[in-house]
Each structure stands twice: as C-alpha cells, then as structure tokens.
Image: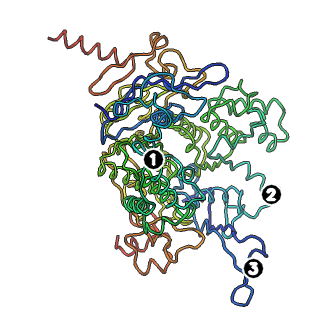
Amino acid sequence: MTSPLVSIRGLEKRFDLSGSLLEQITFEGGRFRRKQEAVHAINGVDLEVQKGEALCVVGESGCGKSTVARTVMGLLSPSAGEIHYGGQRIDNLDGKAALPYRRKMQMIFQNPYASLNPRMTIQQTLEEPIRFHHPDWSTIQVRDKIHEVMHSVGIDPDWGSRFGHEFSGGQRQRIAIARALAVDPEFIVADEPISALDVSIQAQVLNLLMDAQESRGLTYLFITHDLAVVEHFGTRVAVMYLGRVCELADTATLFAAPRHPYTQALLSAIPKLEDDRPSHIRLKGEVPTPVNLPSGCVFHGRCPYANDRCRQEVPRLIATDGGTQVACHAVEEGRL
Amino acid sequence: MALLEVKNLDVRFAVRGGDLTALRGISFTLDKGERLGLVGESGAGKSVAAFSVLNLIAKPGYIAGGQILFEGKDLAAMSERELRKIRGNRIAMIFQDPMMTLNPVLTIGTQMVEAILAQRKISKKEARAIALDRLQKVQIPSPEKRLDQYPHELSGGMRQRVIIAIALLLDPEIIIADEPTTALDVTIQAEIMDLLLNLCEQENVALMLITHDLGVVSQVTQRMLVMYSGRIIEQGPTREIINDAQHPYTQGLINALPQMGEPGERLFQIPGSMPSLKNVPSGCPFHPRCNFATEQCKQSMPEYVRSGNVDVACYEVANLIEQEKRMQEAES
C-alpha cells in the first residue's frame, strides 16, 4: 500500500472549560482545591487519508467531526497526537515552515453566508489567497487564474466586481469552493459544505465537488452528518461517536453491512423514500456530555449489547473479515 | 366537510416599492385525523402557508384574499379575540427551534400550566395534572422532575418532546408542525417523528407537517403538497407523488436526492435556483429552470389538471394527458 497523503495519529483535543487559575480554585472542606474541567472533543483518533479518495467523517453533533477537520487544517492545535502530510509532521510547524502546506491544504466551510468577507468583492476574495501564496505572479497571471477558477465553478467571471450578498446561497458556496481551488490545492477539507443549502442546490454543489476531484485529482476529507451524501460521494467512511472512531470502512461495505451497533442505529434512522412508516433501531437515552466521558466504550450507556468489559475497557479499532475496522468488544468477541 | 379548508388564499407582504406576493391561490383541505405534508425549498412559502392558517402572518404581511375555513368558520375574517380561542386550543403549532419556543426564565411546568389556564377555567393543581399527563404521553423520562426544570437543563430532543407535550395540552384537532426535527440529529429526529406520528394516530389529531425532507414526508404523511415560489404545483396522495411525480420540479427534487443516484455518478441537477419574491417569472414560475418550458409556460400560469389522484399545475403534463385521451379515443 502506498503511503497516505494525510495521516492523523493518536489525535486528542480538549477544550478547557475552567477558565483562569483564580476561577479554578475553590474552597472545600477547609482547604483550597484546584478544579479543572475540559470538553474532551477528540479522544484518540487515528485516520489515514489516501491520495485521490474522499474520506467521509460522519456522526451526530458533538461527536468531534468538525474538530478533527479544524485540527487537521491547523486551525486548532492538537492536545496530543500528530498530523502528517505526505510523510512530514505538520502540526508542530510554525508560520513560515507551514506555508507550503497551507497552500496544498484548503478548507470549505459550512455556511457560505459567514465564510465570505462581506466587504470584499468576489475578485478580491479570490485574489487574496493567490497573491499571498504566489507573490511573484504578475497581475495578468492572477487575473487569468481567477477567471479559470470562477469558470470552473460555474460563476460568470464578469461578476467579479460584485459582493457576496448579491449572490444566492448556492452561488456563495461555489465562490467559497473557487477560493479553495484558486491556489491549486491537493487536499481539501470540506466541513458540512452542503448542509446549509436547499435540496436542488445540494445536488449542484455535490456534482461540482465531484467534477473538481476528477479534473484536479483532489483528495477530500469530507465532514457531514448526512449519510445519504456519504453513500453517494464517499470512498471510505469513518463513523465517529463522542470523539472516537467507532467504525471505518469502504462506503459500499459500510452501507451494506454496518457492524458497530451505533452505525447500525445511525443507518436505520435515515428516513427513506420507500418507507411508509418510520422503522429504526431505538437507542436508549442520549449522547452523554463530552465533559465527563463514560468509562470504557463511550457508547456503552446506549448500547443494547454492552457488558462489563464494555463498561471498563476502551475498545480499539480492529479489522474484521469483511474489511471493516470496528471498535466494539461485542463484534470482536463474536457476540454481534 | 373537511376539518380545514383553505380556499384561494393570497398572502402579500407590503414593502417599499409595492406588494410582494408570498402565496398565490393556495387551496387545500385537511380532514380529521389526516396527515398532510407541505414540501418545498426555502422561499417556496411553506412556512407562510402554515402561519397563515392560524392568521399569524406578522406585518408587513397580510392576507390579501381567500378563505381559511376551520369547521366552516373563516379564520381570515375573525377578530383577534375569537382567534385566540382557536390558537393553541383547537389548532396547535410546533416550531423548528425548541430553544426559541420555550421561555428560558420559566420552568417547564409554569409554561405548561400557563398555556392551559389561558384557555380553561380550572385550578392550577388540575392544570399541573394535565401537564404531567402530557409529559408522560411524550415519553419523557421522570416527568415529575421535568415540570420543575428550566429549558436549558434539557437536551434538544427532550425540549422538542416538551414542545409536543405543550401542543397536546388542550387536545387540539390540528397540529401544525413547522420543520419540527430540522434542528435535531438523525437518531433523535427519527424518535421525534415516530412519537409525533403515533400520538397523532392515537388521539386522532390532524397533522400539517412542513418540511424540506422528502424522506420524512414519505414516512409520516398520507397526502402532500409541493410548493414552488408561492404556489402549490402538485398535490395528492404521498405515495403516488413519491413513486411517480408528475411536475418536472417535483421530479427534479426527488431525482436530485443523493440516494437516487448511483454512487460516484453525477446527481441529477435542476439548473438555477428558486426566484426571489421580488422578481417572480411570468407564467409558470418554474419555467426558467424547466426542460419542458414552452412559449405558453412563459405567458400564463397553468391550471390544475388531474392525473390519477394527483392535481398538477403544468402544461406539459396537461398535454400528455390530452394526448393519452386522444389515443384512447382513437383506439375505441
């Protein structure tokens, strides 16, 4: 197997909740105590993104999928673990050394109403990253590049002097994609790029992303909660729950034979056009808070197959016969 | 007689530079215990349609024409006082965002009791008992405890259960649910939809479900309306429309769903986007995006034609039906 383009190793990310030192100190039982609390957003994630694939990360709100995206991009620094790009560790690089990687890795955000600067024209929005990464380019080179990317995302290059608010949501997302493509990246992290859009526009943007992947040989890390999109778009899928990957598989395999109890419940919850009535696996309770993580398997409190081992021991991702990797004691022991 | 009959409803918004027409000639009925879905993309007017049923259109919006007959009485012509006896009492509403609907500084119990006492002359104790009963109906764990909790102490799914419990407080005939699960995760969405469906069946309540999710509509409703740019372009039995949509827009909407495409292939896409209310195209509002558009479509809005049990507003469909008729006549 060739070496992966991006590899995430033992990634952890905590967000401190306890504030400054003074706020942490409490007086209890006659003595001062220091209390620290943190949101455990990611708790040991290992993922590899192969060149040319679209790796989808799915999960419900609070599972840490967006935090993974942001940490990979360097927008957040990991609390533990490493990010490698093309064999080189990049999470510890500083400004200048990280620059070439910033060009190769671009991000598309969820909300195109917030991700475009309202005071910049489309021309300026697209020009900024090109000028930043190619300071030696002539004005004509920059202009040609802008024309090329605008054309490729289906926005008329004559609209360059307009502002973001003059465009519809779908068009804004096209512009955001153009901005990402402007510096010829190899790897794109797309964080819920179509969730804010209407159904008919979602199809347009999804097609555009697939076109770009084909013509430019892009690799995607695609974050979404929409499993129908994953089934259509993804090469491989990682299902996350409470900051851990619980199942990782080829898209077709995962949808045909989900192994992890959470994946099974998640897949059964998608409303299908053929159904006359909802039919889904019921899970007990709700997602626990990531502040106080459950011991053992993070899913044990809601899992119908949980036993004592699940409550104590954290399951590791283990390859199964079907080619999927599952983090579940029940699957490992053959109980499921 | 239908429980609710909306006839030729026009809703406009008075803005600078003239009126914007948000709803144009909307007509539909809702029978007792029936579940009706309103489908469309943002800007289609589905929420305006839902709000106008309760005459809740806020200024500068106003009902410019048509009738909303609830048990034969026109809600559009009623005084605020009379309307208040119907809102929340006979027709209840569930909104999209449960955090926005619940008052953050009052306990769940206070809010529920308040809603009951606004309509019924009973003691607080009796009202609290009703509140508790409804919380049990929506299967909230430890309902007694919830009565004294504040909204922020509950999770999103739990809050939406409370909202449903509030909607059920006064045994309404109709529940209007505006995107009730859009703000929730898939697994929670499935549970809430399940609950809503079961409750409506048990209590024989009619449900008007506004959503953009065709999967949800297919699972929950018996009949559906498809809206585009303030008009109903197709309405009929849900199964019939989902399996064999007639209007090119409905067909496009269904075919654009990722589950309809082969993995890795390009999805079917409808070109362009929904027009803004400021410049609705002449004739059929869908014609600039439609593959079948003719000169006629640009000039006048098509009348409804019936195909099977489905009413469709489309010249292309009308022509096809006409052709079929002629073929049959020629054969006989």
Residue B304 at x, y percent in the picture: 36, 19
Which of the marked residues, 1 or 3, is nearer the chain's N terminus?
A: 3
Q: Mark 2 to mark 1: distance in Å?
A: 39 Å
Separation (CA) of disc 2 from disc 3: 39 Å
Residue A105's disc number: none
For image coordinates 39% across by 50% down, the residue present is B170
Mark number, residue A228? 1
- Please report whichever mark, 2 or 1, sits nearer to the chain's N-terminal start: 2
Asked which secondary structure carries label 2, the reply is: helix
Mark 2 vs 3, N-terminal side: 3
Q: Which residue does the image show at 79% across and 76% down from the upper left? A: A22
Number of the front mark, 2 or 3: 3
Is residue A236 visible in this depiction of the protein?
A: no
Residue A320 figure quarter: bottom left
Q: Which residue is at the front of the view, A126 or A105?
A: A126
The residue at 61%/23% (across/down) is B278
Quarter of the N terminus of chain B within the rendering: top left
Along the viewing direction, whichever of B97 and A21 lies nearer the viewer: B97
Tell me whether the residue at label 2 lies in contact with that at label 1, contact meaning CB atoms closer than 8 angstroms: no
Q: Is residue B189 above or below residue A289?
A: above
What's under tag 1, amino acid-wise? Ala
**Picture quadrant where residue A87 is located:** bottom right
The residue drawn where x is 54% and y is 66% is A244
Q: Which residue is mark 2?
A: A97
**Marks 1 and 3, Cα distance to the nearest angstrom?**
48 Å
User: In this orientation, does residue B24 appear?
Assistant: yes
Residue that numbered label 3 is attached to = A25
SS under mark 3: strand
Crowdedness of circle 3 by 10 Å Cα count: few (<14), some, many (20+)? some
Q: Amino acid at mark 3?
A: Ile
**Circle 2 chain:** A
State which chain disc 3 sits on.
A
